Structures are given as C-alpha cells and as structure tokens.
Amino acid sequence: MPFSKRIISFYQELSYEAKIPDDITILNPYKDTEVMEICEKFYNQYYNDKNPRRMILGINPGRFGAGITGIPFTDPVNLEKHCGISNSFHKKRELSSEFIYYLITKIGTPQEFYKHFYIGSVSPLGFVKNNKNLNYYDNAILLRKLKPVIISNLIKQIGLGIVSSKVYCLGQGKNYEYLKYLNNETHLFKEIIPLPHPRWIMQYRRKQVEEITDDIISKLLR
C-alpha cells in the first residue's frame, strides 16, 4: 500500500473519546469532508510511493494551520502557493507555516522535501480553550488523559513507513522534554533531535531566520 493511502487512513480513523476537562474542546479537522478531500490531494501528490521517510514532529494542530487544512504546518495560502492545491478555505497566513515553506524552498521544492520527510505531530489532535490554541502539554489533566493516545498515535505514525532511527522534534522546550520522557518509556526512537519551533523563530528570532534555517537544514540533511 502506498505511503499516501496509509496516511489518509490514519487521519480518517483519528479520534478521541475519553473525557477531557469541560473547558477544553478537541480540534479534529479530519471530520470535515473538504479537509479530507484536500488531504487526499496533498498526500497523493507527494507520498504516492512506498519510500520510507524521516519524521518531523510538531506539537499539535492549531486553528489557522493544520486545524484548517488538515496538513501539518500548511496554511491555506501555502497550500495554493507552494503545493498548487486550490481550496476554499479563508486565505489567512499562519506564522509557523510561513517558516516551514521558507525552509522547504531553501532545500529545494516541496516534491524534493516531502520525498524524504513526513511532518506529523506528537498529538495529531488539536485543542482549544477560551477560543485560543492549547498545546497538549499545557493542561496536566488533559496530558494525563492523552498519554496512552499519544503513544498509540506515535506508533501508528511510525507504522506509516517511518525510519525511526532518528526523529526531529519541533520545539526545544516542553515538546522535546515530553517526547524524551515518552521515548525513555517506549524506546520508539533511537535519537531525538530538537529543533526550534517555527512560531518561536518567527516571533522572537526573525532577524536570525537565515542563520537558524541553515542550521536546521544541516541537521535535517546530516
């Protein structure tokens, strides 16, 4: 089965039924028909083969990137501009997506990048609290409930066709620390390589974007 079909099946089956705090809602864009149609176009365009990939893990979907398109770090603007996939989503830019596609163009083309890398998330489901994005690790009760689901979904993502000798973690703080903690228990990856999170770069280190991008590329291509 091609990599693309495995990814699409993974997102189609993605769900979470256990009780979470009442003031938190789950963000699951894959329940939307148009999102799944877009995902099918994207993954069939870049992953319609059986080649193994290395995995880059973000935190969880946000409301203006994967929360809209279903594709990690790909907002509606970059989905059209760089991937050539037209869509009816509101054309709002998202900072993390801006950086990822700047990184991709520095490496080459989306075709070249996605041929070697798969971008996923430690938690493929997103979360919203008070109409704001909530990271999976920012609520202790939520995190405790999520742990078995996160582990299960990491195993499923590796099963898509991932080379697990090393994984790249977007976020050198809490995302990296939690992934390390899980890996000490599960031994899913031989090596976890922390990378600065795209949003942090664009918000706090924009003047050093070129230098940071070159450093990330050197680690990805090492």
Image (cartoon, rainbow, N blue to C red):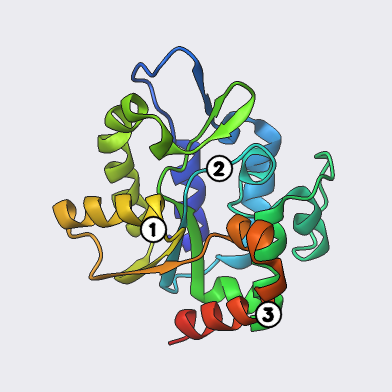
Reading the image, the residue beneath label 1 is 160
* Crowd rating for badge 3 (residues with CA inside 10 Å; few <14, some 14–19, many 20+): few
Q: Please, what secondary structure does the residue beneath circle 1 have?
A: loop
Q: Is residue 41 above or below residue 143?
A: below
Reading the image, the residue beneath label 2 is 61
Q: Residue at position x 41%, y 55% from top?
A: 173
Which residue extends farthest top? 22
For the N terminus, which image quadrant? bottom left
Q: Please, what secondary structure does the residue beneath circle 3 have?
A: helix
- Give the spatial CA distance, label 3 vs label 1: 32 Å
Task: Please count the marks in the image.
Answer: 3
State left or right for residue 169 relative to residue 189. Answer: right
Give coordinates of residue 92: x percent, y percent: 81, 45
Q: Which mark sits nearer the N-terminus, 3 or 1? A: 1
Q: Which mark sits nearer the N-terminus, 2 or 3? A: 2
- Give the spatial CA distance, label 1 vs label 2: 19 Å
Give coordinates of residue 69: x percent, y percent: 68, 44
Q: Please, what secondary structure does the residue beneath circle 2 have?
A: loop
Q: On the image, which quarter does residue 201 sit in?
A: bottom right
Q: On the image, which quarter does residue 180 sit in?
A: bottom left
Q: On the image, which quarter does residue 35 sit in?
A: top right
- Give the spatial CA distance, label 2 vs label 3: 25 Å
Q: Residue at position x 68%, y 64% from top?
A: 99
The residue under label 3 is which amino acid type? Answer: Glu
Does the image show residue 152?
A: yes
The residue under label 2 is which amino acid type? Answer: Pro
Q: Which mark is residue 210?
A: 3
Marks 3 and 1: which is nearer the front?
3
State left or right for residue 199 relative to residue 85. Answer: left
- Residue toward you, 161 or 187: 187
Give coordinates of residue 49: x percent, y percent: 51, 70
* Crowd rating for badge 1 (residues with CA inside 10 Å; few <14, some 14–19, many 20+): many
